[in-house]
Image: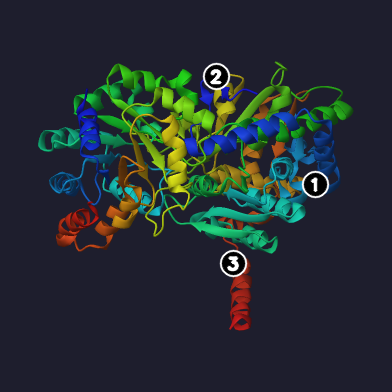
Amino acid sequence: MKSHFGQYGGMYVPEMLIPALQRLAGEYEKARKDKAFLKEFEDLLKNYVGRPSPLIFAKNLTKKLNGAKIYLKNEGANLSGAHKINHCIGQALIAKRLGKTRLIAETGAGQHGVATATVAAKFGFSCTIYMGEVDMDRQRPNVFLMEQLGAKVVPVLHGSRTLKDAVNAAIKDYLENSENTHYLLGSILGPHPFPTMNRDFQSIVGKEIRKQLKTTEKRLPDYVIACVGGGSNAIGAFYTFLKEKSVNLIGVEAGGKGLEVGKHASRFKGGTVGVIEGYKSYFLQDSDGQMQKTHSISAGLDYPGIGPELALLHDKGRIEFISATDSEAVSALKLLAKTEGIICALESAHAVAHAIKLAPKLSKEKIIVVNLSGRGDKDIFILAKAFKDKNFYEFIKREAEEGVIAYE
Amino acid sequence: MNNLDVKLQEIKKRGKIGIMTHVVIGYPSLKDTEKLVISMANFGVDIVELQIPFSDPLADGPTIMKACEESLRQGTKVADALVIANKLAGKVFIPLLFMCYYNTIFKYGIEKFIRDAKNVGVSGLIVPDIPLDEEPYEHFIAICKKYEIHGIRVISPATTGERLEKNSKIASGFVYFTSRQGSTGASLKLNPKLSENLGRIKKIIKIPVAVGFGISKKEHIQQLQGYADIVVVGSKIIDIIDSSARDKMLKNVENFILKIKI
């Protein structure tokens, strides 16, 4: 198992963590060749997560855009509402093999935190989730869910108080407690073996797309589009198609409010190569190597780094990276809801936004698959604000008042 | 032989444990950093570690993290670190080390950084997130050797025998041993297994060993006399800075140093 992707990746961590990471890499190396492990993993994906997730022909959206055929891979149909559960199941099984009793994780939007809390409950681990204070304010419903699942959610109060700071806090916990604790890192980033391990666990998404499209269309897609924060859903959808030259792969980064520093999270537009949080990749950083502030309406895309394997695939030109703005994502979400009856996550809406731009330019024979990484229930508060929904706020006010009375 | 080698020989000869202290450059201000280091040197500190502030200091606990954040908020640049090290090297006789995260060096240019650090009079670099496994990609240790600046290895209680051997082969100057697993920060009690761990390490590491993480009072230093060659006092001094009125800060740090010296 390689620890680097070209010049990217690696294990840039204090010596203190190397033994734990090497043990993890060694155990994963054994597990990936162990038929019993793979069988258990697949069985859980099928009978617990509810895979395969459906590949839906977006008939109305296709008709409206009057171009390429659009298919939606709906990872929002999974248990816990997003693709994150795939690598959580995989890592929980590895943690069990390693005899760990505690899981920790970072979370941005809260999807990975909910998925980690889910597997912790299912497999009997104690669980601590680190979440930036800013993200906790944005994604309170997921905090509530994690707590109901038995996890302790620790607010991270340093730095920009978002995902990168939560990663930092989780690394520190891992430094201290690696003996009994598994750090269930939630994307294809961080030190080796996380980028490889999570990619493998997520690659089920692309494999299913291939199989499902073969049944309906008898061929490969022409385009696969996915949003890219750290990159776990994107690599999951893309990985099986990397060798198929006819399949165009497009990653959509958060364009935020524009391309000025601090207003977006487009690593390939504003970023340079650096070494942070244990791996080498592209980061949004200044000339001194300090991480810059980022912004996205979706907490899950609001991260200054990107998975090292995606950095290599970017340099090789195998994946095209573009961006969609906050307002494009919100409009795409609205259109998808009205035409297809699917309210997707704001993260995934970035991918939808690009499909909406691309489809009309293509002939009707072409096929686009959009990976919907998650469902949008968690974004209801952000959306109500974006849509200036007065009734919603009156409801919240009433609820809050009643809640306060009950509380007192 | 650079300044650090001379100091290490002196510590060995006097048979009393050496004291290394730490500052975050630009905290609470650049001017204060300068004054603090001069005070430390005047009051008998043997080595000072100058930490270049970084936005994502993953080996540091809350005290140093906050100091880094505040220094960056005030606009401290890597260039300031070189300027201040240069000034201090002309004013104090004790060896100065840079402590920084690898991205600071990588972004500046690995060879350029090491050359410039050497040129301003820095004797060694403590970089916690560059393990020897990345040497084939980064050549960090090799470049340190080329410029005769010590690339200080940082090891921990979790470091296995095999990795101790590997680190001992490339170690230079001294080895920095963290008393416990985790991140930096003052603590009340030392790890009960510390002397046992040091015994294990000393069998393999033949150059001086410095112990850091959690060292906050004289008793800690007394406990380490005979087991370690150097103690590192970091977060505790920042705690003192944080709890001092600005005009009492230097005096309080000086008093603390006098109090802990054995």
Which mark is drawn over residue A390? 3
Q: Of residues B79 and A233, which is closer to you in this image?
A: B79
Protein chain holding label 2: A
Q: Which of B158 and A327 is in front in this view?
A: B158
Question: Mark 3 and mark 1: span between their CA atoms?
Answer: 36 Å
Mark 1 element type? helix
Q: Give the crowd class for mark 2: few <14, some 14-19, many >=20 residues within 10 Å.
A: some
- Report the Cα–Cα distance between label 2 and label 3: 52 Å
Q: Which of marks 2 and 3 is nearer the N terminus?
A: 2
Residue ID for mark 2: A6
Q: Mark 1 points at which residue?
A: A49
Task: Answer yes or no: is residue A110 visible.
Answer: yes
Residue A271 shows in this picture: no
B181 or A37, nearer to the observer: B181
Disc with the residue nearer the chain's start (1 vs 2): 2
Question: Residue A281, percent across and down?
Answer: 50, 29
Q: Closer to the observer: label 2 or label 3?
A: 2
Q: Distance between the residues labelled 1 and 2?
A: 34 Å
x 78%, y 40%: residue? A60
